[in-house]
Image (tube, rainbow, N blue to C red):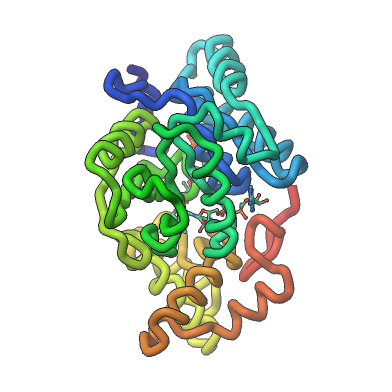
Amino acid sequence: MINFRIIGRQFSTSISKQNAIKNVTVIGGGLMGSGIAQVAAQAGQSVTLVDVSSDVLAKSQKSIGANLGRVAKKLYKDKPEDGEKFVAEALGRIKTATDPGEASKSADLIVEAIVENMDVKHKLFKQLDSAAPAHTILASNTSSLSINEIGSVVKRKDKFGGLHFFNPVPVMRLLEVVKGAETSEDTYKSMMEWGKAVGKTCITCKDTPGFVVNRLLVPYICEAMRLYERGDASARDIDIAMKLGAGYPMGPLELADYVGLDTNKFILDGWHKKFPDQPLFKPIPLLNKLVAEGKLGVKTGEGIYKYDKK
Ligand SMILES: CC(=O)CC(=O)SCCNC(=O)CCNC(=O)[C@H](O)C(C)(C)COP(=O)(O)OP(=O)(O)OC[C@H]1O[C@@H](n2cnc3c(N)ncnc32)[C@H](O)[C@@H]1OP(=O)(O)O
Ligand SMILES: NC(=O)C1=CN([C@@H]2O[C@H](COP(=O)(O)OP(=O)(O)OC[C@H]3O[C@@H](n4cnc5c(N)ncnc54)[C@H](O)[C@@H]3O)[C@@H](O)[C@H]2O)C=CC1
């Protein structure tokens, strides 16, 4: 087992002996999917990364290469040639594809990380359920939707659950493993073992809105946006306050841009629809305006803040 640290966080690239999952298909090559593909490949697994867009896949491969380089720099500080080998080998384990059905045929585990929309996820999971072998576990990386509701369209309900990663996936050490009402004990154990094998500390959570982290974090981010919208403090000062006053690595408004304002809006709108009386889930005009203008945060070069385009 190789252990290493990044900014004080412990990582491991071991493959657990009990982990029977060797072939992983990740659907969605955006922010989260590319990170999930990276950590699985780093752990020695064969990965197929799927997206509807070839352009997205080309961009993902580029960012995975760069992020593997950051990991290698720390892992092989004194042996850069070994670092180059590590990057090349991990990249070599990642194939890309645009057809989810075809890419499911050899998967032991499929992790879905596409847009946060129930209808789109349902359509995809129906297709995956009919294309994947009987033993394949299907999991969603949803931030806020119900695992039971997403899984309602699959026949293999015992082999369906939630695997919720955090952004940036290669750095954040937590994985929330979510048991749906019909997730079997075997599936749950396999998901926990796989999480450990890709270097994460796993916690278990029931299928409740936002699981643990987002149920606490999303209302916090939303309250910061409302504070800013009311003009109570500037964006910079709100972020400085939470970094220096509460010890957070990023302020809430920086974090909103980092997660993606579209994702924040998908989460809030979904919860508001389900729980219309909960004041914490009420729509935020500023968020709606920025998303309508295509200002989605870091990924589009502008959100609450402006960013240099790469
Ligand atoms: C919406 C949801 O459903 C759930 C969510 O994900 S909610 C969001 C959860 N995430 C957070 O809360 C993130 C909070 N922010 C942080 O932890 C930190 O600001 C951060 C790790 C993102 C960046 O840290 P930073 O110190 O500000 O910046 P930076 O110097 O670029 O990165 C720190 C280190 O991480 C490494 N790093 C950052 N991103 C990386 C990546 N994608 N891959 C590999 N390494 C990475 C960098 O190489 C750097 O390493 P060194 O310090 O050794 O050079
Ligand atoms: N952004 C974040 O910080 C986090 C997001 N999540 C969740 O992960 C999921 C993905 O989020 P992001 O990676 O941020 O989104 P993103 O917008 O960066 O990536 C989504 C990708 O899915 C692709 N896609 C859409 N429909 C598809 C389909 N039918 N088949 C294949 N690919 C398809 C899109 O082309 C896009 O590249 C969402 O459910 C989100 O809620 C979970 C944790 C953190």
Query: In the image as oriented, which residue stretches furthest toward the left?
Result: 185
Q: Is residue 187 left or right of residue 268?
A: left
Residue name at image x 39 percent, y 74 percent: 219
Can residue 4 be seen in this snapshot?
A: yes
Q: Quadrant of the N terminus?
A: top left
Is 17 rendered above or below residue 101? above
Residue that appears at 57% across and 51% down: 124
- The residue at the point 73 percent across, 74 percent down is 293
> Is 229 placed left or right of 306 in the picture?
left
Q: Which of 205 and 292 is in front in this view?
A: 205
Name the residue: 71% across, 40% down. 59
User: Which is more toward the observer, 154 or 216?
Assistant: 154
Q: In this view, does 302 lie above or below 44?
A: below
Total tally of numbered discs in the picture: 0
Q: Position of residue 62 (x, y in %)?
A: 69, 34
Q: Work out whether residue 165 can be spotted.
A: no
Residue 19 % position (x, y): 32, 25
In the foreground, 227 or 281? 281
Picture quadrant where residue 188 is located: top left
Q: Position of residue 141 (x, y in %)?
A: 45, 50
